[in-house]
C-alpha cells in the first residue's frame, strides 16, 4: 500500500497547483480525482470554450462575409466534432504534463 505526505482531492487548477508545489517542496503527493485530470478549466471550461468561441467567430464572419466584400456563398454551418478536434491534442498534452509533475506511483 502506498503512503503519502499529502493527499490533494481534485485535480483542477486549485488541486494541481497545490500538488505541484507540495511536490517541489519534497513531499510525496497523492491526487484523488473523480472525473478528468485538469478539472473544469482544462476539460470543459477555459480551454475548450476558447475553441468554441473562435469557431463561432469564424462562422459569423462566413455568414456575413458579404459585409466585408467577400462572397462565400453564405450557407456556412458548424461541424461540432471538427470544431473541438484541433484543441484535443493540446488538452491531452497539458493534462499529461501537469500530472507528470506530481504523479507518484
Ligand atoms: C465555461 C467556463 C469557462 C471558463 N473560462 C475561464 C477562463 O477563460 N479563465 C479562467 O481563469 N477561468 C475560467 N473558468 C473558471 C475555471 O474553470 C475555474 O475557476 C477553475 O476550474 C477552478 O478550479 P478548481 O481547481 O477550484 O475547481 P475545478 O476545476 O472544478 O476542479 C475540481 C476537481 O475536483 C474534482 N472533484 C470534486 N469532488 C471530488 C471528490 N469528492 N473526489 C475526487 N475528486 C473530486 C472534480 O472532478 C474536478 O476535477 C471557466 C469556467 C467555465 C465553467
Image (cartoon, helix red, strand yellow):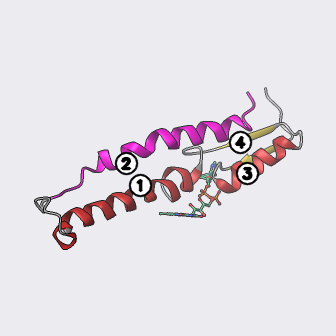
Q: Which residue is mark 4?
A: 31
Q: Are marks 4 and 3 in contact (CB under 8 Å)?
A: no
Crowding at dot 1, Cα within 10 Å, few <14 / some 14-19 / many 20+, comes out as: some
Residue sitting at 17 percent across and 64 percent down? 70
Q: Is residue 60 left or right of residue 49?
A: left
Q: Are marks 1 and 2 in contact (CB under 8 Å)?
A: yes
Q: Quadrant of residue 25?
A: top right
Camera-nearest label, 4 or 3: 3
Specify the segment rendered in magenta. 76-105
Residue sitting at 51 percent across and 42 percent down? 90
Q: Which residue is mark 1?
A: 51
Secondary structure mostly taken by the magenta-highlighted segment of the chain: helix
Q: Position of residue 69 (x, y in %)?
A: 18, 69
Query: Does the residue tagged 2 have its C-beta within 8 Å of any atom of ligand 1?
Result: no
> Which numbered marker is on residue 84?
2
Q: Is residue 105 left or right of residue 97?
A: right
Q: CA distance from mark 2 to mark 3?
A: 26 Å
> Which numbered marker is on residue 17?
3
Crowding at dot 4, Cα within 10 Å, few <14 / some 14-19 / many 20+, comes out as: many
Q: CA distance from mark 3 to mark 1?
A: 24 Å
Task: Classify mark 4: helix, strand or loop.
Answer: strand
Q: Earlier in the sequence, mark 2 or mark 4?
A: 4
Q: Earlier in the sequence, mark 1 or mark 2?
A: 1
Q: Position of residue 65 (x, y in %)?
A: 20, 66
Q: Earlier in the sequence, mark 4 or mark 3?
A: 3
Q: CA distance from mark 1 to mark 2?
A: 6 Å
Residue sitting at 68 percent across and 43 percent down? 32
Task: Classify mark 3: helix, strand or loop.
Answer: helix
Amino acid at each position: 500500500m502506498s503512503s503519502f505526505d499529502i493527499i490533494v482531492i481534485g485535480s483542477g487548477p486549485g488541486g494541481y497547483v497545490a500538488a505541484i508545489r507540495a511536490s517541489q517542496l519534497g513531499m510525496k503527493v497523492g491526487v484523488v480525482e473523480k472525473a478528468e485530470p485538469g478539472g473544469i478549466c482544462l476539460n470543459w471550461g477555459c480551454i475548450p470554450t476558447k475553441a468554441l468561441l473562435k469557431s463561432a467567430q469564424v462562422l459569423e464572419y462566413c455568414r456575413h462575409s458579404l459585409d466585408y466584400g467577400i462572397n462565400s456563398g453564405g450557407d456556412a454551418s458548424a461541424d461540432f466534432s471538427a470544431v473541438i478536434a484541433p484543441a484535443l491534442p493540446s488538452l491531452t498534452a497539458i493534462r499529461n504534463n501537469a500530472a507528470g509533475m506530481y504523479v507518484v506511483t
